[in-house]
Image (cartoon, rainbow, N blue to C red):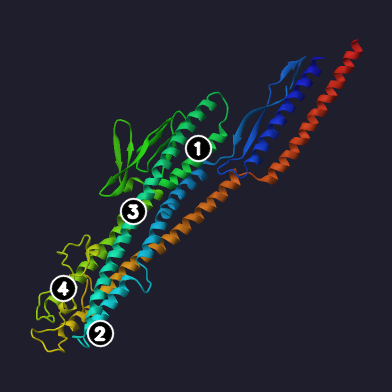
C-alpha cells in the first residue's frame, strides 16, 4: 500500500507541476505584446528519493524556480545605443525649427538684403525721384523687420527648447521614483525565495527610458539592489531612495540640478547625455552661434550703410546722417535692434557733394556697391555670402543629425530584434509547449486514475 501512496504522490506532483507549466505558458502568451517583457520558463527538479524497502523511489517533480530569458550584454548594449538615439532625437526638432527660421526660400533675409541694395541701384538712375526714394525707405524698414523677425524666431526656438527641458523634469522624477519602488518590491519578493521577474522587466523598461532621456547609467550593488546615476557618476537612485531631479533658471535658460535633501548639486551640460544633452547642445552651441553670426551681420551691415550714408548729402543739403539707428558697435542683440533712423525721403543722402546737381548719384552708387564690395567681420564674405554661410551651417548640422538619428535608430532596431530573439515570446513555441503540457497533464491524470483503481482493488481484497 505504501508503494501506491508514493505513486499517488508522484501523480499529484506531476499534475501540479504541469498545471504550473501551463500557467507560465499562458502568462507568456498574454504578454506577447507587452514592451520589455522577457519570456518566463519553469526550472524543474526532482523531489529527493526515499529508501523504501531497500529501493530508492522517486517522490515526483517540483518547480524549483521560474526564470526569465535575460541577457545582460544585449540589455547593456541596447541601453548604450538608446543614449545615442536620445541625443540625436533631442536635437532633431530644434534643428528642424532652426532650418525653418533660416530658410532658403525667396522670402528669407538674404532676399531682403538683395532687394534693399537693388532699391539703391534703382535710385542711381534718378536720385531725385520721390517714388524711388520712398522705395529705399520701405526696403530699409523691411530689412530691419526681417532682422527683427529672425531674431524673434530664434528667441521662440530657444523658449521652446527651455519649455521642453522643463517638461522632462516631472517625467524623470516619476521614473526615478519608479525604479526605487521596484527595488523595494524586488527585494521584498526575492528575500522570501521567489523570483520578481515581472518587476525586473518593468525596471529594465524604466532604465531604458532614463537612458534615452539623460543617459542614465546603472549598476547592481552588493545587496543586489540597482543604483542609478548620471553619466558623470552623481547618484540619482540608491537602493530604495530616489533623489529629486530639478530645473532652475540661469539668465533666462533652464539648467538642472539634483536635490539631495540637505544640499544640491548643479549639473553641467557635459554631465548629461541623451535627449537633454542633445537639446542643450542645440540651444547653447548651434543656436547661440547662429544668433551671434546674425548679430554680427546686422551690426556690420548697418555700420557700413551708415558710414557711406554719412558721407553723402541729402535733398536739404545736409550730410552726416545715419540711415539706420546707430547700434553703438554692440554685437549682442544687434539683429533685434535694427531699425530706420530716418523716415523722410528727402533725408536720403544720394548725392556725393554739397549743393549737388539734380543728377548727382555718387553716394547712391557707393551704397549700391556695398552689396558686392563690403565684407563681414574678419571674413571675406559679402553680406549675402555671410548669411548663406549661416544657413549652410544649420543645414549641414541638420543633415548630420538626420543621418546620425537614422543610424542610431537602425542600431536600436537591430538590438531590439536580437533581444526579442533571445527574450521575446514566440507564439509558435508557446503553442508547442501548450500541447506538450496538455499531454503531460492528461498522462498525469490517467496515471492517477490507474493508481486509484489499484488502490480500490487492494482495499477490496482486504475487505
Q: Name the residue under label 3.
A: 159
Mark 4 packing: few (<14 Cα in 10 Å), some, or many (20+)? Answer: many
- Drawn side of residue 158 relative to residue 328, left or right: right
Residue 247 visible somewhere in the drawing: yes
Residue at the disc numbered 1: 203
Return the x and y of residue 390 as percentages of the image width and height: 31, 67
- Which residue appears at 53% of the width and 53% of the height? 413
Q: Disc 3 and disc 4: Cα gap in Å? A: 33 Å
Point out the frontmost of discs 2 and 1. Answer: 2
> How far across and down, in percent of the image, does residue 341 sit?
17, 70
Cβ–Cβ under 8 Å for marks 4 and 2: no
Foreground tag (3 vs 2): 2
Q: Tell me the SS state at disc 4.
A: helix
Q: Which residue is tagged 4? A: 306
x 50%, y 37%: residue: 203
Give the foreground label among 1 and 4: 4
Amino acid at each position: 500500500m505504501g508503494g501506491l501512496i508514493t505513486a499517488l504522490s508522484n501523480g499529484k506532483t506531476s499534475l501540479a507541476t504541469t498545471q504550473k507549466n501551463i500557467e507560465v505558458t499562458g502568462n507568456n502568451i498574454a504578454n506577447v505584446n507587452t514592451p520589455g517583457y522577457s519570456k518566463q520558463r519553469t526550472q524543474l527538479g526532482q523531489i529527493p528519493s526515499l529508501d523504501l524497502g531497500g529501493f530508492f523511489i522517486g517522490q515526483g517533480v517540483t518547480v524549483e524556480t521560474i526564470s526569465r530569458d535575460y541577457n545582460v550584454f544585449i540589455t547593456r548594449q541596447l541601453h548604450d545605443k538608446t543614449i545615442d538615439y536620445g541625443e540625436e532625437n533631442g536635437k532633431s526638432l530644434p534643428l528642424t525649427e532652426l532650418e525653418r527660421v533660416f530658410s532658403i526660400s525667396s522670402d528669407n533675409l538674404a532676399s531682403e538684403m538683395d532687394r534693399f541694395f537693388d532699391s539703391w541701384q534703382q535710385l542711381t538712375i534718378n536720385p531725385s525721384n520721390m517714388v524711388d526714394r520712398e522705395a529705399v525707405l520701405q526696403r530699409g524698414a523691411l530689412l530691419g523687420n526681417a532682422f527683427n523677425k529672425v531674431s524673434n524666431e530664434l528667441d521662440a526656438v530657444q523658449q521652446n527648447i527651455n519649455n521642453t527641458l522643463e517638461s522632462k523634469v516631472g517625467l524623470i522624477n516619476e521614473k526615478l521614483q519608479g525604479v526605487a519602488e521596484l527595488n523595494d518590491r524586488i527585494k521584498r519578493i526575492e528575500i522570501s525565495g521567489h523570483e520578481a521577474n515581472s518587476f525586473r522587466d518593468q525596471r529594465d523598461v524604466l532604465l531604458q527610458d532614463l537612458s534615452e532621456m539623460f543617459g542614465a547609467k546603472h549598476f547592481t550593488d552588493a545587496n543586489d539592489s540597482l543604483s542609478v546615476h548620471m553619466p558623470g557618476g552623481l547618484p540619482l537612485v540608491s537602493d530604495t531612495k530616489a533623489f529629486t531631479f530639478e530645473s532652475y533658471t540661469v539668465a533666462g535658460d533652464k539648467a538642472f540640478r539634483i536635490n539631495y535633501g540637505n544640499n544640491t548639486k548643479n549639473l553641467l551640460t557635459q554631465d548629461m547625455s541623451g535627449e537633454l544633452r542633445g537639446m542643450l547642445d542645440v540651444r547653447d552651441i548651434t543656436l547661440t552661434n547662429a544668433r551671434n553670426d546674425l548679430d554680427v551681420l546686422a551690426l556690420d551691415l548697418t555700420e557700413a550703410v551708415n558710414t557711406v550714408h554719412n558721407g553723402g548729402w541729402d535733398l536739404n543739403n545736409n550730410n552726416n546722417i545715419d540711415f539706420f539707428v546707430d547700434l553703438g558697435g554692440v554685437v549682442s542683440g544687434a539683429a533685434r535692434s535694427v531699425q530706420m533712423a530716418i523716415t523722410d525721403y528727402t533725408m536720403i543722402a544720394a548725392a556725393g557733394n554739397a549743393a549737388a546737381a539734380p543728377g548727382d548719384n555718387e553716394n547712391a552708387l557707393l551704397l549700391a556697391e556695398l552689396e558686392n564690395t563690403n565684407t563681414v567681420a574678419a571674413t571675406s564674405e559679402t553680406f549675402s555670402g555671410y548669411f548663406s554661410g549661416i544657413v549652410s551651417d544649420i543645414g549641414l548640422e541638420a543633415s548630420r543629425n538626420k543621418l546620425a538619428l537614422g543610424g542610431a535608430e537602425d542600431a536600436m532596431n537591430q538590438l531590439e530584434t536580437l533581444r526579442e530573439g533571445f527574450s521575446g515570446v514566440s507564439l509558435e513555441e508557446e503553442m508547442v509547449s501548450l500541447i506538450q503540457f496538455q499531454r503531460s497533464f492528461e498522462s498525469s491524470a490517467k496515471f492517477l486514475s490507474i493508481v486509484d483503481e489499484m488502490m480500490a482493488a487492494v482495499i477490496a481484497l482486504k475487505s
